[in-house]
Image: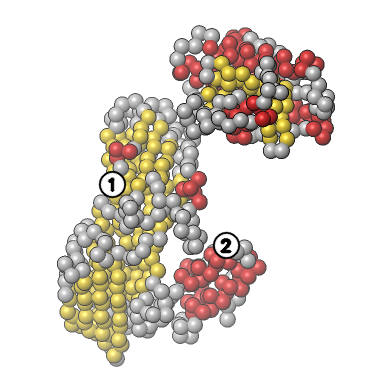
Amino acid sequence: MAQRAVWLISHEPGTPRCGTVKFSRRYPTVEKRASVHNGANYVPVPEDGPFLKALLSELRLLGDDKDFVESRDSCSRINKTSIYGLPVGSEELWPVVAFLKNDMIYACVPLVEQTLNPRPPLISISGISQGLELLFGIQDFLYSGQKSDTELNTKLSQLPELLLQACPFGTLLDANLQNSLDNVGFASVTQPQKQPAWRAGTYKGKPQVSISITEKVKSMQYGKQDIADTWQVVGAVTCKCDLEGFMPNVTVSLHLPTNGSPLQDILVHPCVTSLDSAILTSSSVDGMDDSAFSGPYKFPFIPPLESFNLCYYTSQVPVPPILGFYQIKEEDIQLKITVNLKLHESIKNTFEFCEAHIPFYNRGPITHLEYKVSFGQLEVFREKGLLVWIIGQKFPKSMDISLSGTVTFGAKSHEKQPFDPICIGGTAYLKLHFRILDYTLTGCYADQHSVQVFASGKPKISTHRKLISSDYYIWNSKAPAPVTYGSLLLIHVCVRKQERCKLQSTASHCLTSACRSFPASHPSVLNFLRTMTFIFPLAPVT
């Protein structure tokens, strides 16, 4: 006499699933005995989801289950007991003891210690009467003196430990669970629940929640027809939740506008308790997938006491915020420079700051400068070989600005002059530094009215967002420049096709191709690209 599994299912008419599994317990040792006794007719106990659907259908509790099913509804099958057979694939799980009481379905699968073909008479299966006794005992325990949903949930939380005492290894010892409750004393239930490792303590004070979205945009622009410009957005959502209570729950939703760029490659903090599978499957590696999830992105979590990063993400935005062109022509000890910058019309034209840094490596100090700038002002750091173009807080209405000039250098000095092994000869870059407040390039935002907080008190909720430049380079269009995008793309394609045997040779070929445009006087270029581009070991490159 033993039970293979036990379930408690709340019946919820009007909901899509019509029921929810509140409690389930399986007994692997009894399941092993069932496979031995039942032989070729053995049917394993299914997972909770398929079992729930089959049971609700058999009990005629599915809201849309109005069709005639001969195996269930024909006159030749009149069920006067609470014993059912449930379809499991092409087989049938029998016997299943189940009944509905107080909007709760009680179910179990008794062990049959004999062959199931032909089916033995019910009176010969002692596990059925034992299963009914167990289910009636659970029912009495749940609803004796129970007056509210809170008390019911408390008793449901006590069931796992009570069944260890009343029904160890699936064998019923005492159907009166109240006796087990009195004997155990239930110290483990009455004690406070253990807090998660990331919340070591409690907060006392004014409740408030702060959510900050920071996006960093990276770009490599070359101004060449044979090399494509690249750009990418990397975002981070930072939260600070000052909430009283033992384990407060918070749900933050990230939203996108209609034309927003979907979030991809999302990584979440361990405190996130659940996540929609569509959020996890959106990947920037899959360039052919046009079904990216566009939100809203919901993150329920139990917050740590300190500030933490709720999630990270990437995004493939259609255009970089600032398009640039940079050109250098070298004449003896002088350099003629031309710079054009254009702010895209879709970008918010309100900067906290915006600067373009133009360094000159491996040369002497700047001794003379003649320039013409259409907007902003230019600062010269002669000893550092650096020009800083301060654009300010706005682009002009035309969105276009330009800088041109001639720079003269003095004799080289190896003491303080900046040196770079890549920027040799005409290989040079302009680097943009900017920040835009209350703006994100993807359009991602956190609506403070959609933030749900389950804790004592009404917290003050504040949201912030900003866009920051990071590694935003514009390379001299008249000289070689390090190119990494093609190598990474080919590696992604190889991994997606699982052509692991070709990965090493493909990466080596890409690295060699990327370096062909550099003169032989760049001995450190190969090591530089190897470090910056590849995460896989490469074959020797010649």
In the image, is 202 to the left or to the right of 18?
Answer: left
Identify the image quadrant of the N terminus. top right
**Circle 1 is placed at which residue position?**
464
Q: Amino acid at mark 2?
A: Arg
| Residue 282 image position (x, y, % from top left) | 48, 53
| Residue 295 image position (x, y, % from top left) | 40, 47
Residue under the image location 58 percent in, 32 percent down: 67
In the image, is 381 to the left or to the right of 271?
Answer: left
C-alpha gap between disc 1 and disc 2: 37 Å
| Residue closest to the eye, 288 or 90 | 90
| Residue 396 image position (x, y, % from top left) | 16, 67
Report whether residue 285 is seen: no
Residue under the image location 33 percent in, 73 percent down: 474
In the image, is 205 to the left or to the right of 514?
Answer: left
| Residue 269 image position (x, y, % from top left) | 45, 44
**Circle 2 is placed at which residue position?**
496
* Image vertical order of residue 240 relative to residue 351, above or below: above
Q: Residues within 10 Å of mark 2 (few under 14, many from 20)?
A: few
